[in-house]
Amino acid sequence: MRATLIIINHNGRHLLETSLPAAVAAARAAGDHAVMVADDASTDDSLEFVSRDFPEVRFLAFPRGGFGRTCNRAVEAAETEAAVLLNNDVVVTEDFLPPLLADLAEESVFAVGCKFLNPDGSLTHALGNRVSGEWRRGLLYLHHETDPELLTETCPQLYANGGGMAFRRRAWEALGGFDDLYLPIYWEDADLGYRAWGRGWRVLYEPASVVYHDQGSTMGRIQRPPQVELISARNAVLFTWKNLLDRGQFRRTLAAQSRWVTDDVLVGGLPNRMRALLAATKRLAPAARCRARESRERTVSDEEILRRARGESA
Amino acid sequence: MSAPNRTVLLLTFARRGEERAIQAAMAALTARIPGARVIAVGTPVSAPVLRALGIADILVYGDGKSARRVIEEAQLFMPETVGIVYDDPGFRAHLKLEALAFVVGAKTIWRFRPGGEAALGAQASSLPVRMGRFGLALSVLAKGLQMLVRLGVGMALTGFACSYLCWYGRSRGGRGASRT
């Protein structure tokens, strides 16, 4: 199976200096695979750097679209059966690709996520390792496995983080890729994984496919600015509105969301979670359209999705 | 003439890392009421933190014991003074602690500054606000009303979202709920 390694870039020339050579080396080591830089309207010299130092790498410059839309455009432009999305601050190991492609050979597998490590070899928390989920207090709470002992074998996970995930393009297209509902960023990969499980596919975690993530290089990942926090919180709400189809759980979740406003801080303006609710309401119409589609195409219940993603058999 | 009751009820959602703030609040309270006997209300989680601070009498609720039972036990001590340490920025937490202070019948309430863990340094805790029963009742009432308004707004928002999502789904022929 041929793959295209797609590095999503926005003004990250300094990051490409490290991540691109590693991606090119991995593509070569694994055989005849392509490498692409999908650029989200960079204003730095990313284009010059890539075309000068890596002429074999395809550089696609897209108009400003946000993370999800740029990924969709890049995947559409790729010409291989499989694709691997990589953040520009993710440095792959030379042998990271074959285990991913081996997992994807199974028809039931939609996507496979890498093992994310910090440069010092510890597990990174910014990008999730073996993610599972649980409906709690009005949201889907995501749990990232932090015990290295439990991350030694290929296993199911709820979704593969968009910073390092491989997938079959045909399945990606069938799912419609990342949903614009979440633009500019956050929760689009969780949504995609959830929808894949909901249609009967599987998403795996592959510990043999190791990549390194330099947390410090990513803007605001450790301490995100309030505006970015709000986008993430809004998208968490939109995720529930779009994807939670189980009537009882949906009612309980919305009831919990309505109580959020009583939890929030007494002083300091409008409470954060209330602002997230208000922001989500502005996208209610597209969320309803997406939900209606989910309702038509879903074949697996919400409860079953989470159970399967935890690796629990029926 | 009966001797003044020197029991001080300490109300807090003590958590690890907030010991300094609680200690400062205790020091401020015992400085105002020499020889005071401090009794705290806590949860199974907060009890060890309070115990480590030297509070021997802790009324623990949760773990099978209802809040009502704890209130009854606290009332038996007839505390005239209550110290509230806001170590949680949550709105509901504020209301809960003040309501508890009111129902145990305390006459004087020392409220240590709200604003979360960051604001609860020793300095903040040494500057408590004194309230009488009337002031406390007003505060509980105002917070209760505010809570109702907030709940109303929240329910209106999510109710609207829920109705719209369900209506749209039905109008497009969706099932509305999934099955395996």
Image: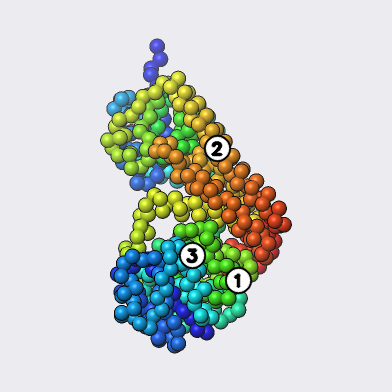
Of tags 3 and 2, the one toward the viewer is 3
Which residue type carries mark 2?
Val
- Cα–Cα span, label 1 and label 2: 39 Å
> The numbered mark 2 sits on a residue in which chain?
B
**Whole-number angstrom distance, CA of label 1 to CA of label 3:** 16 Å
Mark 2 neighbour density, 10 Å: few (under 14) some (14–19) many (20 or more): some
Q: Which class describes the residues within 10 Å of circle 1: few (<14), some (14-19), or many (20+)? A: few
> Residue beneath label 1, please?
A174
Q: For mark 1, give the secondary structure.
A: helix
Height in image: B60 above or below B29? below
- The amino acid on which the numbered mark 3 sits, given as a three-letter code, is Arg
Residue at (48, 33) in percent of width and height: B95
Please tell me if label 1 and label 3 are on a single chain.
Answer: yes
* Residue A11 position within the rendered picture, expressed as x and y whole percent measured from the top left: 34, 66
Q: Earlier in the sequence, mark 1 or mark 3?
A: 3
In the image, is A308 to the left or to the right of B32?
A: right
Using the rendered view, name the quadrant where residue B112 is placed: top left
Answer yes or no: is residue A180 visible.
Answer: yes
**Residues flagged by tags 1 and 2 on a common chain:** no
Q: Residue furthest front?
A: A63
The numbered mark at residue A69 is 3
- Give the residue type that dot 1 points to: Ala
Residue depth check, mark 1 versus mark 3: number of the one nearer the observer:
3
Q: Which residue is mark 2?
A: B153
